[in-house]
Image (spheres, coloured by chain):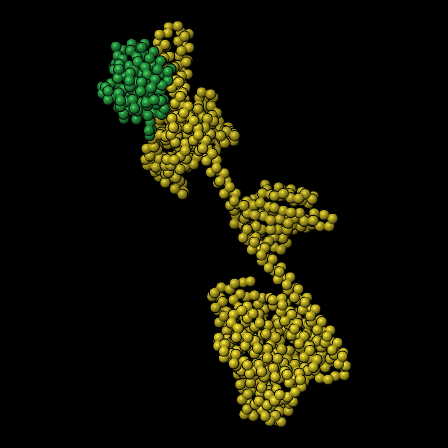
Amino acid sequence: MERIGAERLDRRWRRLRLIADGSGAVAAGIAACILILWITRIGAGVSDAKFLFAMKPNTAIGFGLTALAFIMLVHGRARAACVLALPPLLIGLLSLIQYAARVDLGIDQLVLRDWSATGVGHPGRPAPNTAITLLVFDTTLIALAAIRGGSFRPFVTKLVAFAVIALAMATIAGYIAHSDFAIGWGTREQMSIPSTVCALALGCGLLAYGWQVETAATALMPVWIPALLCFAVVLFDIATPLQINAGICYIPIILCALWFDRPSVAFVLAVAASLLIVFGLFASPPSAVPFSTSILNRGLAMIGVWVVATLVYLQRTSQQRLLRNARHLASAQELASIGSFELEFAGMTFKASREFEQLHGVAFEAERDWELFLRRFVPVDERDGIREMIRAAQAGENPSDFHYSFLHADGTVRNAVMHCELLHGYEQMPMGIIGIIKDVTEAREAEAREAAIGSQLRHAQKLESLGTLAGGIAHDLNNTLVPMTTLLPVILEDTKDPMQRRALEITIDAARRAKALVREILSFSRKEENDVEAIRLDELAGETLTIVRAGVPTGIIIQAELSPVPEIVASKGQIYQIILNLVTNAAQAIGDRRGCILIGTRAEDGGMIRLYVSDDGAGMDEETQARIFEPFFSTKEAGRGTGLGLSIVSGIVANHGGTISVESTLGFGTRFDLVFPVEGRQDNDAPFLKQAKA
Amino acid sequence: MTRILVIDDDEAIRESLALLLQLRGFEVLTASNGLDGVAIFDAQRPTIVITDMMMPGGEGRDVIPQIRRIAPDARIIAMSGSSSSGEGGLLDRAAELGADACLRKPFEPGELFVALGRERG
């Protein structure tokens, strides 16, 4: 079902209205001309020229009023339409009664009282088909004018327009086939050419009106399709003299229901056909065939009509259900971003749903080669995994969920998850798989982000609890150390024995180391004064390097790539501590060998500043890399490090709203990347800086 | 002989400081909490008080002003084992309260004697 855009709808509406108006005007014009001819009797002498002048007076009145009523309806004048449509309706109805009952109700002489000169049986009476046309058309007009709204409009107008056009086309066919019984059901009354043109015009007009009142184009059918099919009706008239199988000729009409979106149209047409079959029985001329045979024939025809109608109805119902299901499935897939496919093992070809195509960004042909698909859309290293899964499925193993990545037509690599099920054929033979794929790229990214946040949070929590613990321990340790640091030096002064002096010196040294260690732990738990100021990382790094160089072995070259960067708001002391720590670590990683430390700054897109420190030292394995920011994790020999350096660094970086990452290859070196936002953040609630309640 | 009062809840610290100071010729009084400390100070009037900042029963921050009130010219040295600086640092607080010198535990004899100033035993 296609929703038509407002502008297009408007254009379409105007065009259709023009067609409706034009059709009404044509019919009204023809009827008026004929009526004038009759009244002035100009044509009385030439009435044999039936192509020009065989339209009966009553027919002319009927079509004229009908056309006017139609124009009123098109222009929204409902009451006028009703009033104008009523007389032609009565003309049609009474004429039909006269034919069926073989009586004369006197309406034929409405206009023309003296018909002796016309040479036809009932010079005033419309032909049967004309009468039907008028009856049906005007009933419809009244219904459309009287009943406002309702979904029946497009449906009914289309149906009636179809019937009217069908009758008119059948008449034309009758003329072409030179059937004297064309649309006369065996009587001598024939639908004239002018009547046929009027009926056609009004039918087309009604069709246009029907489409005009539709907002959504449902089962639009081109005008020529029903018209063409209705030639079939002529068979009835051609067959009539034989009185055999006449009714069967109506069966094709039922097939026209295939073009209506309501399945029940089949039954509507079946009712119409049944009525016509019965009507034909009485209206047809007497023949040699016994009446009982005729009844039998027509009864069979009616059964045929209803059987076909039922089949058509069932076909249309299931077709519509399928259409609805397909639409439902497509919408559901689109809403869920889940594509589906079906792979057949026999030819290794697959069919894909529309959403499957959407996910890959291309449209596939109906049958697509699976191997080509893999080569085009799946990265090399993932193809084997999928092939393996398919091979297992071919061997009868039910495939498990499968994660893989594919190349989208726009060039991006996307993550997908495939969920398949085996399709079994004869004797449980695996015939293929049906599967769905879901693009999980965004979900994956969100998961990764969440995991990163979670790990940062755990890290921060760990630091916080350690800080609290360390603060408490440090206080007690400091007290415990006092006797050693105060008394041992005094004893040392008074000790002369070298051995004892050495022993005391070692003990004093150990106490000092313990003191330094406690200081470091305390600095970890302590909230330093955060005198933040605007600093430039390149300048600060430059200053720091002059100090650091002195402490680095001469075999190590320190190279600076300090491009000017915007200022950030940060604690100078803390940033200094970071650089010092990273450079010291780098120097220790190089050790006594010759090596190079590179320190650099760079302004990056998005208001970020990168500070990096790399070395060509020993490097780290992945296990070590994963743990270096953990407190108390150290690779240095006991006594050389507390394992707090990098965790303090990461704490400071986080406190400045930045991020730290490490890249390292064992044997080739390590690189630390610190990224700070220019809009520096001083988060005073950062957990690892909370003061221990010592 | 200069008389020094050492106030600390930790016995080891009290005794080691007493030993060290006695070795250097000072006369040493000790108290294990702030209340006792102030009482002893009031009774004996030592020249110098070395007090811990964090003790049960009268903390250093109560001791310092009380002693100042009793003897405005007494030399008060505060010591603490927790962090020295930063917001709410106890030693900063001690300096604000009127301590003449601050010692961060653990300290060495040299630091202590610098804090004691020119006083000799």
Foreground: A126 or B37? B37
Q: Nearer the viewer, residue A249 or A394?
A: A249
Residue at 43% from the left image edge and 26% from the top image edge:
A469
Quarter containing the C terminus of chain A? top left
Residue at 35% from the left image edge and 35% from the top image edge: A570
Task: Left or right? Give the position of A559 relative to B6.
Answer: right
Query: Does residue A425 appear left or right of residue A207 in this picture?
Result: right
| Residue A69 picture location, percent across and down | 52, 79
Chain B colour? green
Q: Colour of chain A?
A: yellow
* Residue A357 pos. (x, y %): 57, 52
State left or right for residue A426 relative to residue A322. Answer: right
In the image, residue B89 sits, relative to residue A358, either above or below, namely: above
Q: Is residue A232 visible?
A: no
Q: Residue at x 48, y 25 (%)?
A: A635
For residue A638, say whether it is visible.
Answer: yes
Looking at the rendered image, the quarter that the N terminus of chain A falls into is bottom right
- Quarter where residue A687 is shown: top left
Give residue A315's position: percent from left, percent from top: 66, 64
Q: Residue furthest top?
A: A497
| Residue B104, picture quadrant | top left
Q: Is residue A673 above or below residue A281?
A: above
Residue name at image x 52 percent, y 48 percent: A411
Left/right of residue B22 with respect to residue A229 in the rendered view: left
Above or below, A334 against B28 in this view is below
Q: Is residue B71 above or below residue A417?
A: above
Q: Position of residue A620 (x, y in %)?
A: 50, 29
Q: How many numbered marks does the figure carry?
A: 0
